[in-house]
Amino acid sequence: MTESEQIVYISCLEEVRYSFVSHIFEALCLKRINDVFVDSDDLLSKEAQAKVERARVSVMILPGNHTVRLDKLVKVLECQRTNDQVVVPVLYGNRTVEAEWLSALDSKGFSSVHQSRKECSDAKLVEEIVKDVYEKLFYTGRIGIYSKLLEIENMVNKQPIGIRCVGIWGMPGIGKTTLAKAVFDQMSSAFDASSFIEDYDKAIHEKGLYCLLEEQFLKEKPGADGTTTKLSLLRNKLHNKRVLVVLDDVRNPLAAEPFLGGFDWFGPKSLIIITSRDKQVFRLCRVAQIYDVQGLNEKEALRLFSLCASIDDMAEQNLHEVSMKVIKHADGHPLALSLYGRELKGKKRPQEMETAFLELKERPPAIFVDAIKSCYDTLNDRDKNIFLDIACFFQGENVDYVMQLLEGCGFFPHVGIDVLVEKCLVTISENRVRMHNLIQDVGRQIINRETGETKRRSRLWEPCCIKYLLEDNAEKENGEHKTNLERAQGTEEIEGLFLDTSNLSFDVKPAAFENMLNLRLLKIYCSDPEVHHVINFPKGSLHSLPNELRLLHWDNYPLKSLPQNFDPWHLVEINMPYSQLQKLWGGTKTPEMLRTLRLCHSQQLVDIDDVLKAQNLEIIDLQGCTSLESFPATSQLLHLRVVNLSGCTKIQSFPELPPNIETLRLQGIGILSIVKPNGEDITSLLEELHGISDVLLQRLTSLMNFSSSCQNLGKLICLDLKDCSRLKSLPNMINLESLEVLDLSGCLVLKTIQGFPQNLKELYITGTAVGDLPQLPESLELLNAHGCADLQSFSVESVKLPMHYTFINCFKLSSQEVDKLLVKALAYVKHMPREHQKELNKPLAFSFCAPSHADQNFTPCLQPGSSVMTQLNPSWGNTLVGFAMLVEVSFSEAYSDVTGLGICCVCRWKNKEGRSQSIERNLHCWATGEAVPKFQKDHMFVFFDVKMRPSTDDGNEPDVFADLVVFEFFPVDRQTKRRLDDSCTVKRCGVSAIDASTGETNVKIGYFVVLSLLSYASDSSDEGFIKSMVKEVKDLMARIRIKGKPSREVISQGVVFVVPARSLDITHSENPKLWTWSNDAQSEAGIEIAKLNKIYWLQIKGYFVTRKLTPGTKYKVVFMIYLDDTAPGWEEPVTLNLKLKHRDGSQSIQESTLCLNDYIYHNWVDIQAGEFEALPENVVEIFFSLHQYEYSNRKSGLLVKGVAIRPTDQVII
């Protein structure tokens, strides 16, 4: 970018030039944006026009005279239209012409306008403007850099006084140099000397250390004494000076070490920044603070790609879907997005763009290939093999699985994978090996470039190529033998072969693998479980398998055994699910390296004795092998940790197992008795397995008791006793200190549990006959008790999050028990120190479900319908912890759960410019496949989720108009995310914001929670908090009426009943700036009148019990209102709603809209919400509301007297 292109032009009025605009000018200078031209003339002078024509960004400050400013704006736009320049409009100060300005700017295509506003200080507005200018000024090169720049600055500022060092680490093209330049531009002016050395390795190689130092820091020419003079001059020059040095793209730490050896020359607070793709550079250069550069988020990536591809309107050109594929593949990589964008520029049709993109994937950009290849070339042969195996076969696989296989190949992966991680070639995330798509493309290209012949490549993964090598064409032509022989020759180079058989059907030749002497990894699988591939051996045999195999994974293997001449010595894993195997092999073969054997659902398998020779075997999984009648004694397999015999229905005797077994799964096994010959029960047997951690004994009908002698099961982690239908009781399991998962689901006669392990995390008691649960441990995160019809109580001493409790159809469970748990859970958030609240930021922190009770303490906070509005604390950005969300769901008899239930929550708000924004999350109620019985009544769901809050794409707090947010809730199918039909509806809902004071542990939680705390808090730890809250509760109750249930004062005037305004729920009526109250002098009842001063968002609602009405009389419900002559903002219609609640629990709703502009009179008027007939045996309660949720106009001038319920022939009172 040239110097002229960095000009920022600012147009403003003289009155703000030396106040507001001066702060913008200063902030831009701090960002090293020094060429700023401020123009305060009314007309565009020649000098100003020349600046505009050269400027990259023009900031138009638009106060005061609308006509003059618009005329100048038009001229600026004309100057910039042909120069790819941008305008940043700012509405500052005078708001009387705001609407006109917004309309004018909108007509010019400005969707984003900065506005001064009451809730936003000038300092914050300046920060917004400068960030916008910065990103627009540096255009595509620095999209997404601003937030990273702030993080680097924060990292630097936290370091102690001295020589500060920061490393910037990331894969090639991720933006390390761009970020380092941004930091340099931002901070260099604060240092006495500064230097940015690009491509450091090349610079030090070409110029040498001393020339480089002289060039960067020593402008004076030294005398004849050469090197010594240079060094002394450098020492004198830099001594006690604050120096900023950036060494960019350091690859060889030995080259950087001599330069950095002069750290002691620099003064305190000097800053050294090193960028590198290799973390080893930072370690050897003793740089402790390392910034890991992440890719762009989706919004930033879309913006960069659109700019580079010159796509102005994706929706109009139907290019969005293809563009998102490109963005997903680039995975936030700025260089790739830029290169892809330029390559796809001009492609106007989706098919054309997609074809071009597929070609690009086949040939990654040369600049990126060269960068990755140069990094690859520094690896030793073992690490290169690890890199290529991951690129071709192991993307996204479990890291332990990959380690085991690569270790079997002799590659020392514990060292090699660390090397790849440090060089940014792979990452380890969630215990899986990840490789960026672009790096994977380069890795596969390295393989494809090995040779032009497919059969001579070391790794194969493309189905068509593999099919060509394996297919048997013997019956298709006379020269078939020669053809097959030619194809087989040269395959000695193949080391790995992964074949996805989806949509493939062919015959494999018997000698398919005969010449693949170096094949280490063989996997034949189907990625689509709904497709049944057909891979056959027409001659019924496979001649051989390579003896070098480490992995043999073959889904649906069609033969009865493995080839007789196959030697399994090197095999690490056999994974052959749904095979036709009857046995593995015969003879005396020894699979010395075998660690894992999985033959799940091999229903023809009858003999498994071969495994006894595998002395290093760790896992045996024979689930679903229904023909297997015996399992050999494996006590001599000392490394065996996991045995799964679930579903082996013909096994009649319990096998002897090694003492180090950790996981034992026997679900549905055919054992008639698990009593040992000496008469001891299953518990005694398990105690002999000192290493046992996971036991599955599902559907063991012989199990009636579980011995209390459990002291030797200290390593037991998981105990699964599901569907043990005769199990009646469980002892106190306090000694099982390691037990984390206990599943007792389906134990229909289980009534007594004496005690739980203290570290238990998951408890499943679905369908049991338990009436009272002993004290639940504090560690418990998940409790599933749905269908426990006899459950009455449970004890919770204290709680911590995350916590997920389910009590579906537990109708005997008392509402007091439920209230206590909810109060303690939300109180836990109150006590959590703010620095630990990020622990809740991963999954949903709290969920709860139980049948609804009319006397529940939390019921008053619920409002009818599926949406609710709440107002945030003005300082919510600093104090909001999250929201407690309560949703009451009604289920009809037609409801049937198949794939799991979820509640979709949508949080909506409007920004200060009036634009709607929202976030959406699906809150899970129970998992797919869980047996949820028929619902017999309404259920209450409670959630606490710290992520369900207003936020921007970059995670910052947004501007929220009037601090108002609306929550909407919809039942959805958990799997498909589709909304459910009327068989499952939201009946009522409520939301409470949980606020925390910064740096303090006390929390102001919703007043309904405070009331519950006062009623139910019993532990001494909460006592002081409760006492301190008493005054606040009193003040709170003086200002706020309980939502949905206001004070039920009803005035009776003969046959007419009036709910006065004070008894209605009028949003923000307690705020004197928005509403004022006065007495109606003409009313004998002394009714107070609410007068609206100003508001955007209007909601008035209330309710009335019909028992005092005359039976058989038809009544109408009317809002008694008055609008003065000047009442503005009522152009949009209001909505009136009347909901009738019937005795049988059903509801009926009447809804209408009308425009209040038609009712601006000098008298009171009735606005009818609806009519109904008073039938005591039918209508028992009515709910009414008047609302207008449009933010477009500010409303005022409305007076509200109340709501009258009068006979339809009654006149106005």
Image: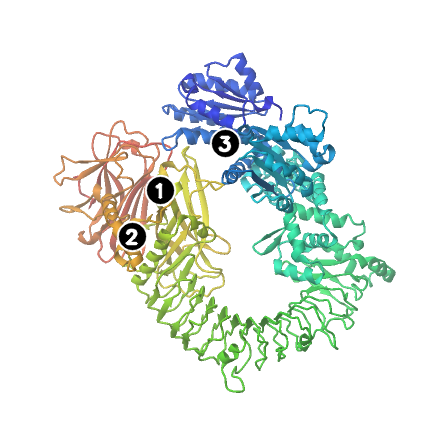
Query: In the rendered structure, which disc, 2 or 1, sits on the residue that comes first in sequence?
Result: 1
Q: Which residue is mark 1?
A: 872
Q: Which residue is mark 3?
A: 131
The mark lying in front, picked from 3 and 2, is 2
Q: Is residue 685 above or below residue 996?
A: below
Specify the label residue 126 is tagged with.
none
Disc 1 packing (10 Å; few <14; some 14–19; many ≥20):
some
Separation (CA) of disc 3 from disc 1: 26 Å
Disc 2 packing (10 Å; few <14; some 14–19; many ≥20):
some
Q: Quadrant of residue 390?
A: bottom right
- State the SS at label 1: loop
Q: Which residue is mark 2?
A: 1025
Q: Is residue 312 visible?
A: no
Separation (CA) of disc 2 from disc 1: 23 Å
Separation (CA) of disc 3 from disc 2: 43 Å
Q: Is residue 1157 above or below residue 402?
A: above
Query: In the rendered structure, which disc, 3 or 2, sits on the residue that comes first in sequence?
Result: 3
